[in-house]
Amino acid sequence: MEMELIYGLDLSVFLYLLAIMMFAGIVHGSMGLGFPMVATPLIAVLLDVRLAILLTLLPTVTVNIASIWSGTDQKDSLKEYTPMFVWTLVGALIGSWMLVVFDPSPFRLALALLILLYLWTARSEKAIGRWICPGNTMVAAAFGMIAGISSGITNVMIPILIIYFFSLNIPRSKMIPIFNCFFLIGKTTQILVLSVAGLINLGLFFHTLLPAVVALAGLWVGSKAGNRISADSYRASIHLLLFALALMLIVQFALATLEAG
């Protein structure tokens, strides 16, 4: 059913999808992260979370690879956080399996709550880390697992990663490639699980090739324009948009629940 809907998107929906890819790419290029967190809810409010994840698979992987490639300290980051990467992979396997097996409707609420969690962490950076022990391997494993699960079922792991990594005093030039490595692990694991489940095939990638190219164009524009825009006002605008999307997803979940009841 999902595949038929993907191939049957009308022109207006497809143009809407391209606009989202461009916008999410610009956000990611200017901030270094955020592509799936912006793109997924914007698509989910029109369609559903599962379909939003399917449509953003190739664009997200493309943006993540480009972001990692343009970053620094990739090799050191991979070595240092390999155990956490492994737990993220395990979590992504679990979350992707949940996406296949369970009704995707409740994932709207999960996505909305993750967005609100991200917004809270963004406004509470100084408070983050007081209860986290950065050197504790069990803490790192737990955050990696939770991030992977949230990526699998909602396409978003940024809130979980921010809570953990903001407690580590590391430079942005190193943090961004680390984040994108986590995103890429979650996304490739998701592709593997969904492929085995029969939800995606080569046809999906051919149909989302143009959106992936548009996302890359947005990434380039965002990377060039990021330094020209006030960081505070830009971030405030994105946060306002995400808050509105979270409320919309919660309302949609509530209405769907009432109709089902």
Image (spheres, rainbow, N blue to C red):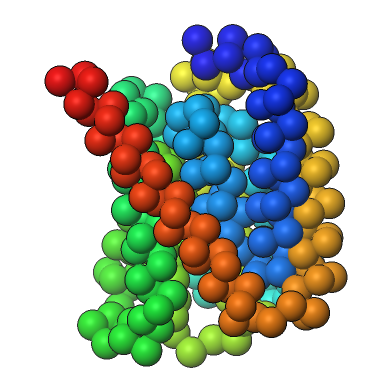
Front residue (pair 232, 220): 232
Front residue (pair 230, 55): 230
- Residue at x 68% of width, y 35% of height: 17
Image coordinates of residue 86 in percent, x first then y, are 45, 55
Front residue (pair 78, 183): 183
Q: Quadrant of the C terminus?
A: top left
Front residue (pair 258, 30): 258
Image coordinates of residue 241 in percent, x first then y, are 52, 58
Answer left or right for 218 relative to 35.
Answer: right
- Residue at x 61% of width, y 64% of height: 33
Q: Quadrant of residue 8?
A: top right
* 59 lies above or below 15: below
Instruction: Tell me how many marks there are.
Output: 0
* 162 lies above or below 214: below
- Residue at x 57% of width, y 30% of height: 54
Answer left or right for 18 relative to 132.
Answer: right
Q: Quadrant of residue 6?
A: top right
Do we see residue 234 in this rendering? yes
Answer left or right for 56 relative to 66.
Answer: left
Answer left or right for 235 relative to 15.
Answer: left
Image coordinates of residue 109 in percent, x first then y, are 31, 43
- Residue at x 25% of width, y 35% of height: 254
Do we see residue 84 in this rendering? no
Image coordinates of residue 197 in percent, x first then y, are 47, 19
